[in-house]
Image (cartoon, rainbow, N blue to C red):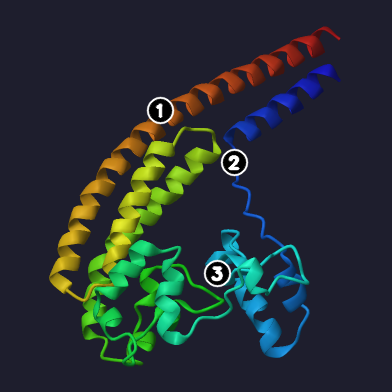
Amino acid sequence: MICKNTLAILLLALLAFLQPAQAAPVEQPETVCIQCHGSLPDRLGAPVKLWRSSIHAENGISCNGCHGGDPKDAANAMTPQRGFLGAPKEKDIPAFCGRCHPGVYKDYLSSAHGRALGAGGPTCVTCHGNHQVVKASLALINEKSCTRCHSFDRARAIRDAMQQTEAYIDNISRRIAAFQVSGVDTEKMGKSLFAVRNRFHTLFHDVDVARVKGESAAINQELGKLDAALKEIERSHEKRRLAGGIAVGFMLLLAVLFHLMKKSYD
């Protein structure tokens, strides 16, 4: 019985050793805004439903993060004294979003889109949505969205030039996140990736195809450095994993041999 229990424990240890850790999801804050509007019908409740599937909700940013107000006091949640801002007018939307995204706001203002603000040009919500805010990605550059205002030719060329870089960023981001969960110090790499990603995102509002291609190539070089550092960590971890697997396997083998020897003497 003891040998069987030992085998079971060792087997579970081996499985746990080989099983990758999972990151815990960000818990969504249940503010009084959500509690109240979430129970309301039609247009008053719709924003909450849209928000729940947004990148803001995914990152724990609730209603008060954009609209201000007191998220804990239902009676005074929407009073100016508690900082409630409400919904901005269309021409004020970029500045409204720019409070948290100053770099993107600056890029937008210098772009063809930003220069057309107030004259029929798009704002942040035109492409990213308002309550169901979509994560910035090349998926936003698509024929259906872009042709609402102009042809898709230039936008397609820009998207095609950026696709490889975006895939590279996503790959490195996943690998850094996996190491972070397993306890590896990834702070420096995370900061480097954050800077590179921000640099990449500045291209999203650019309509100069040549510049986008040149910047994408330069960003790929920076990503190559992060990729090399990650590969070094991966090689080190693979060696440790192999050594650990061999050690556990050896212990299992000893346990089996001990069990067989004991059985032969019974």
Residue 204 appears in the picture as rendered: no
Considering every residue shown, the one lying at the far top of the view is 265
Q: Quadrant of the C terminus?
A: top right
Check residue 236 in the rendering and tell me which mark sits there, or answer none: 1
Q: Nearer the viewer, mark 1 or mark 3?
A: 3
Query: Looking at the image, is mark 3 or mark 2 earlier in the sequence?
Result: 2
Percent position of residue 61, x then y: 58, 62
Cα gap from disc 2 to disc 1, whole angstroms: 18 Å
Q: Which residue sits at x=76%, y=21%?
A: 6
Task: Tell me the SS state at disc 3.
Answer: helix
Q: Nearer the viewer, mark 3 or mark 2?
A: 3
What amino acid is found at the position of numbered circle 3 in the picture?
A: Cys
10 Å crowding of disc 2: few (<14), some (14-19), many (20+): some
Q: Which residue sits at x=63%, y=80%?
A: 47
Q: Quadrant of the N terminus?
A: top right
Check residue 66 in the rendering and tell me which mark sits there, or answer none: 3
Reading the image, the residue beneath label 2 is: 21
Q: Of 124 and 248, which appears nearest the observer?
A: 124
Classify residue 133 as left or right of residue 1. Answer: left
Q: Of 164 and 61, which appears nearest the observer?
A: 61
Residue 240 appears in the picture as rendered: yes
Cα gap from disc 1 to disc 3, whole angstroms: 44 Å
10 Å crowding of disc 3: few (<14), some (14-19), many (20+): some
10 Å crowding of disc 1: few (<14), some (14-19), many (20+): few
What amino acid is found at the position of numbered circle 1 in the picture?
A: Ser
